[in-house]
Image (spheres, coloured by chain):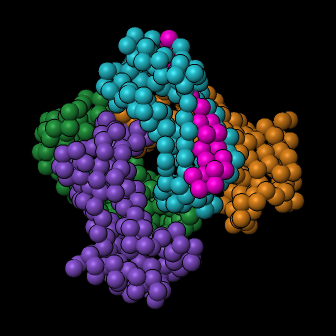
Chain colours: A orange, B purple, C green, D cyan
Amino acid sequence: MRLRVRFAETDQMGIAHHSAFVVWFEAGRVEWLRDRGMSYRTLEEEGVSLAVSELRVHYRRAVRFDDVLHLDTRMTDLRSRGCAFSYVLASEETGVVAARGQSLHVATDRGGRAIRIPGAWYERLRRAADDEAA
Amino acid sequence: MRLRVRFAETDQMGIAHHSAFVVWFEAGRVEWLRDRGMSYRTLEEEGVSLAVSELRVHYRRAVRFDDVLHLDTRMTDLRSRGCAFSYVLASEETGVVAARGQSLHVATDRGGRAIRIPGAWYERLRRAADDEAA
Amino acid sequence: MRLRVRFAETDQMGIAHHSAFVVWFEAGRVEWLRDRGMSYRTLEEEGVSLAVSELRVHYRRAVRFDDVLHLDTRMTDLRSRGCAFSYVLASEETGVVAARGQSLHVATDRGGRAIRIPGAWYERLRRAADDEAA
Amino acid sequence: MRLRVRFAETDQMGIAHHSAFVVWFEAGRVEWLRDRGMSYRTLEEEGVSLAVSELRVHYRRAVRFDDVLHLDTRMTDLRSRGCAFSYVLASEETGVVAARGQSLHVATDRGGRAIRIPGAWYERLRRAADDEAA
């Protein structure tokens, strides 16, 4: 996934604010699903969310307004009730890594209660995770 | 309403980003309602939103990280299907105006359809608007 | 300019928050400049900002998570000390207009003082504005 | 530190977006410094930033629009070139923990280069960290 740093994402240090990376990682998850034929929007419309239960970010290099970034997203774990993703964000031009991250997710219903990932979705995620590991 | 500019709200110009004011005005509306015994959260829980249909902001002075601001919010119009608010944002220390704004709102249901403001809410808003005009 | 609504840009009404449009319009200005051979990043690096002095947004239709939007940005005025842009945001799929906006800008130096747009930049903006009007 | 969840901080799941917590933690650091007689704004004006190098968040309970939260911030480590903070975010009403977090920071100059924390600042941070441990 390709991203361009928005002006609104900068802070007075002249770099992208560290909270922007969290938003980009989320966009990375959505694109990861789309690239594998799944729509997070549809999942949400069916009443299922992949709520973030844990997040880790290692910031390596600052990124600046208008920088073009490449975000590599992978599913690193899949269970009946949740999953995990990892992220590598790098400069598109230089390939230098700007940040790495991981997130854990639990499937929840509209009321925020933990649920099992519905069967059909789980199967599709399973195949995508297997393809990735292959 | 008293606000302190957050670091995340700054941009690389070293000032609060112009989109932050829009978020502050919204917080001002919520506090305006609370100060008059109404909860925007409850209104939303009852399925009614005051969706923004129009927004104007005049930026007069930049505000900086950690500045303490005073936001004066007023309801300037109330109709069966919507209302209007105006805002004056000023430095708490100097009183210098940083921005003025206006917003128009339409009442909507959960599906986003325009509706009449429910009677009991309309009456409360009416009294609050009248008190303000008095 | 093509945009996809991010999950983080939604609010509990289930639609993109009205402050997100303000961020998108800014991204539209940056791309408008880039499309005409100008870099807003370079302008900023030279110590010149186009600070927002006034902003208007008319919201027509809600947009939702994952919607793909088309943003049409135009420069509508250019003066020695500032400029104006207008925006039309529409669904890429249906062409239905979601919002229209206008912004006024004043050129400022790093200290936030109003300045004249530097000559070389003014000329480039002038040509771009003339091309657009033609 | 006391916080109220803003409407703009919610997402379409009807809860505060997970990136909002990152912004709140930052506000917590600023208030931690202020409570101990230090101004992060002044530190930045002197050309020193405490850039985030690592961030961890454990999300325990969703928080909702208009919830009042209590954020407890502590400095957990101080070195010549950086420091660490931890956070506990809880409902003010019930005391139930919504999230815990940790952040690591490196001191940087205006160019983003890692530096030693200036002596006078280090001493003040040292005393504050010692008081906290006592």
Between C5 and A102, the one nearer to me in the picture: A102
Kindly tell me whether residue A21 is visible in this rendering.
no
Please tell me which residue is depicted at 66% across the width and 47% down the height of the picture: D97
Q: Where residue B10 sits: x, y (%)?
A: 37, 40
Q: Is residue A71 left or right of residue A132?
A: left
Which segment is the magenta one? Answer: D80-101
Please tell me which residue is depicted at 36% across the width and 50% down the height of the picture: B3
Q: Where residue A52 sits: x, y (%)?
A: 68, 47
Please tell me which residue is depicted at 14% across the width and 41% down the height of the picture: C114
Between C45 and B95, the one nearer to me in the picture: B95
Magenta segment, principal secondary structure?
Answer: strand
The reply to whether the magenta stretch includes residue B5 is no
Rendering quarter of residue D118: top left
- Up/down of C123 relative to C62, above or below: above
- Up/down of D56 relative to B76, above or below: above
* The residue positioned farthest toward the front in the image shown: D134
Kindly tell me whether residue D125 is visible in this rendering.
yes
Q: Where residue B73 sits: x, y (%)?
A: 30, 65
Please tell me which residue is depicted at 42% across the width and 68% down the height of the picture: B34
Question: Can you say which quadrant of the picture contains the C terminus of chain C?
Answer: bottom left
The reply to whether the magenta stretch includes residue D84 is yes
Numbered label tally: 0
Between D37 and C91, the one nearer to me in the picture: D37
